Amino acid sequence: MSGTFTIEPRGPFSLALAASHVFGPREPAPVVPVMRLAFCVDGFHELAGVVLREDPAGSVVGKVHGATDVAAVRDQVARIVSLDHDGRGWPAVGERDPLIGRLQARYPGFRPVLHYSPYEAAAWAILAGHRSGRQANTLRRRLGEALGATFDLAGTRLSAFPTPLAILEATSLPVPSIEQDRRLRAVARGALDGLLDPARLRALDPEVARAQVQALPGLGPFYSGLVAIRAVGPTDAASVEEPRLLAALRHYLGAEAPADAAALTRRMDVWRPFRTWAVVLIRRAAYEDGVG
């Protein structure tokens, strides 16, 4: 173990809910909240395993395995579970919008869980092309076991995705096709060139960030949003192109649901400055309700 850190949530937060998030690293909701993470640390020099728990006061305590830069790991974990944002204004969105209020009550302490980094999100997008999420995760684990590092985290073994340099230096990659090998190497080069730096992407307008990320082979409009938004974590950058959002709103709102993208844009104004959080909350509920 390399060290420990503490994060003090600003506003509501549930670690148990984060650990069972359908879009991020997933585990069954535990009786005692614990979340296990394994990832390539921002800067791409180290791999880390992390075990998160909540203390009785509600602080999030992390134990770091492998990586020596505990501060960098802490900052990345905060981003992954959206604790790098002040969420004290989030409940007010539910007061303005009854649907969000109902879902906040259903998921108390909800915050989006992100992909580990833009680098790993881009790599996952390459692995997920024409495959199920389960198949993509299997390929990701295979790459982590072969070229990354595996950590024993509170009784569970998790593999961290390789560094970009490890990808580039490998003679071959354990993936199904030559094209995937080529595209993963392009992602690795893009990461080392700074294209996938999370701070740089967050400083950009989200649409500009999406356009830049699409320079990587294999990343079209949908997956560029996954990288530039769902791995960077702006609170208010929701896109009306979010898959299945209109269908979910029709399910929950019936005739009051927006009919098209223009109406959806107007409907989303009440969610500011947490439009992204509202979209992910609706999508989580819809996923569990079998909508779309």
Image (spheres, rainbow, N blue to C red):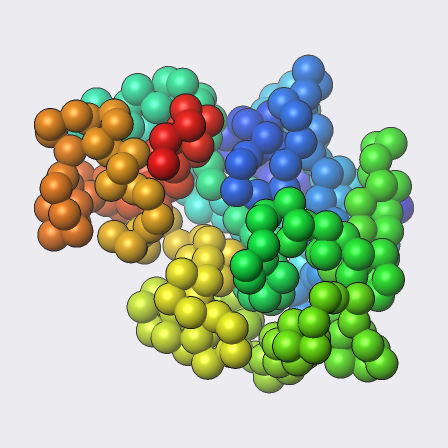
Front position in the image: 59 or 243 = 243
Residue 117 in sight from this viewpoint: no
Could you tell whether 272 is left or right of 280 in the image? left
Front position in the image: 144 or 95 = 144
Could you tell whether 1 is left or right of 241 in the image? right
- Tell me what residue is drawn at x 75 percent, y 44 percent: 50
Front position in the image: 58 or 196 = 196
- Tell me what residue is drawn at x 30 percent, y 20 percent: 102
Q: In this rendering, is residue 117 above or below 84?
A: below
Q: In this rendering, is residue 36 above or below 151?
A: above
- Tell me what residue is drawn at x 70 percent, y 71 percent: 177
Q: Position of residue 82 (x, y in %)?
A: 50, 44
Could you tell whether 149 is left or right of 270 in the image? right
Picture quadrant of residue 88: top left
Could you tell whether 102 is left or right of 66 in the image? left
- Tell me what residue is drawn at x 42 percent, y 28 percent: 290
Q: Position of residue 71 (x, y in %)?
A: 69, 55
Q: Position of residue 106 (x, y in %)?
A: 40, 18
Residue 167 in sight from this viewpoint: yes
Tell me the quarter of the image containing the C terminus: top left
Q: Position of residue 34 (x, y in %)?
A: 70, 29
Front position in the image: 154 or 257 = 257
Q: How many marks?
A: 0
Q: In this rendering, is residue 52 above or below 29?
A: below
